[in-house]
Image (cartoon, rainbow, N blue to C red):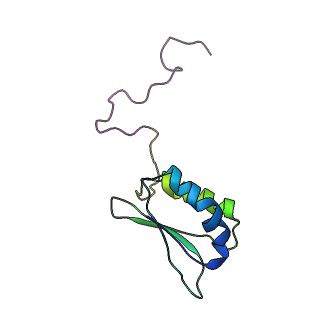
Amino acid sequence: MFQLTRLSLSGFIKSLLPQFAGNHPQVEFSVSPRPSKHPVIIAQYINGREKAICVRNMEPYEVLKKAELLRDASGEKLRKITKPVQSINESVRGVWSPYHGDGMQV
């Protein structure tokens, strides 16, 4: 679900939101006023998490890009990946590289 606020976003709400909502019927949209506060897009995900992005001073197409970013996100918390390969069972031999062994001359 997305929540869009502030009347300055009327260009996005009137022109781009109906087409975006028509193309993505699986997404629920609600527009709510927030007087004297910055406009925010809030995404609520199935896993119970919420993500909010401030869209202050953005053009309608920039707001559309932020809505697409939230639509494509999984809702999971961002984590730093420490290893290039993630596996349940760690490999005894390590990560494969073409430079190991006798297979390739450098």
Give the farthest residue toward the bottom: 36
Q: Look at 60% across and 78% down and name the residue there.
A: 6
Q: Is residue 5 left or right of residue 25?
A: right
Q: For residue 13, which quarter of the picture?
A: bottom right
Q: For residue 95, which quarter of the picture?
A: top left
Residue 62 image position (x, y, % from top left)? 67, 61
Q: Look at 40% across and 56% down and name the residue there.
A: 76
Q: Look at 32% across and 35% down and name the residue there.
A: 90
Q: The C terminus lies in which quarter of the figure?
A: top right
Q: Is residue 48 magenta?
A: no
Residue 72 image position (x, y, % from top left)? 49, 51
Q: Look at 59% across and 76% down and name the residue there.
A: 39
Residue 2 image position (x, y, % from top left)? 48, 66
Q: The N terminus lies in which quarter of the figure?
A: bottom left
Pick the residue in front: 96 or 79. 79
Magenta segment: 85-106
Q: Is residue 88 magenta?
A: yes
Q: For residue 19, which quarter of the picture?
A: bottom right
Pick the residue in front: 25 or 85. 25
Q: Relative to residue 46, is residue 93 depicted above or below?
A: above
